[in-house]
Image (cartoon, grey):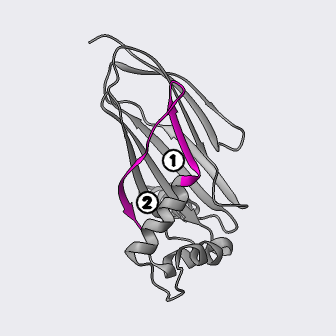
Amino acid sequence: MNRVGIALFAAGILLLSGGAAMAHRLDEYLHAATLDLTRTHILLHLRLTPGVDVADGIIRQMDRNSDGHLSPIEQRAYVSQIMQGLSLSLNGRAARLRVEALTFPTIAEMRAGTGVIDLRFSVKTGLQTGSYRLTYRDRGAGTGTVWLINCLLPQDPAIHVTRQKRSEDQSSYMLDFSISPP
């Protein structure tokens, strides 16, 4: 095969793989969460993606006045509803999640299955040298909810993830980590 043939073959593979990466869930409400650990706080990044088949039900929960637009008040009310289903604890003590940022897609994007509700929460901590256990639970938004959860690699070299354990459906998560002396 000559260089042009190889280049065309490679381009075809890239195009095909790009199409698969663009696929989205149709009949599920994806709750994808990542945790980021630092000594001063824990960040929870939650991305909610309603699939095409469930989007109208999710939209009805958010758009209380049915005007086809999500006002800031409706957005905050929905975030409060989502927060009621979340729990996070550190060494057995409940942690209070604080909303850091929220971004909502348009209703048209949600109906197309491409709209992602992007929520960022934080928990203030004052972590010292020692071992910790973080537990997280997302009770979801009803039937059709699916979960993904993971911890990002800590940027602080003194923070070490020692164990992760998820429920089979990933709605519950336990993370053991330690902080070594400076």
Q: Could you classify mark 1 by the number of other residues whose Cα lies within 10 Å: few (under 14), some (14-19), or many (20 or more)?
A: many
Name the residue that disc number 2 marks: 118
Of residues 28 and 71, the one nearer the viewer is: 71
* Magenta-colored span: 84-104
Residue 67's place in the image compared with 56, above or below, is: below
Can you give x and y, in whole percent of width and height, for residue 126 in the image? 32, 26
Residue visible at 35% across and 14% down in the picture: 129
Q: Which mark is residue 9?
A: none
Q: On the rendered structure, is 139 left or right of 162?
A: right
Of residues 59 and 16, the one nearer the viewer is: 59
Q: CA distance from mark 1 to mark 2?
A: 10 Å
Q: Could you classify mark 2 by the number of other residues whose Cα lies within 10 Å: few (under 14), some (14-19), or many (20 or more)?
A: some
Q: On the rendered structure, is 99 left or right of 48?
A: left
Q: Which mark is residue 33?
A: 1
- Residue 130, by quadrant, is top left
Q: Residue furthest left?
A: 182
Principal secondary structure, stretch drawn in magenta: strand
Q: Is residue 13 visible?
A: no
Of residues 71 and 25, the one nearer the viewer is: 71
Q: Amino acid at mark 1?
A: Ala
112 in magenta: no
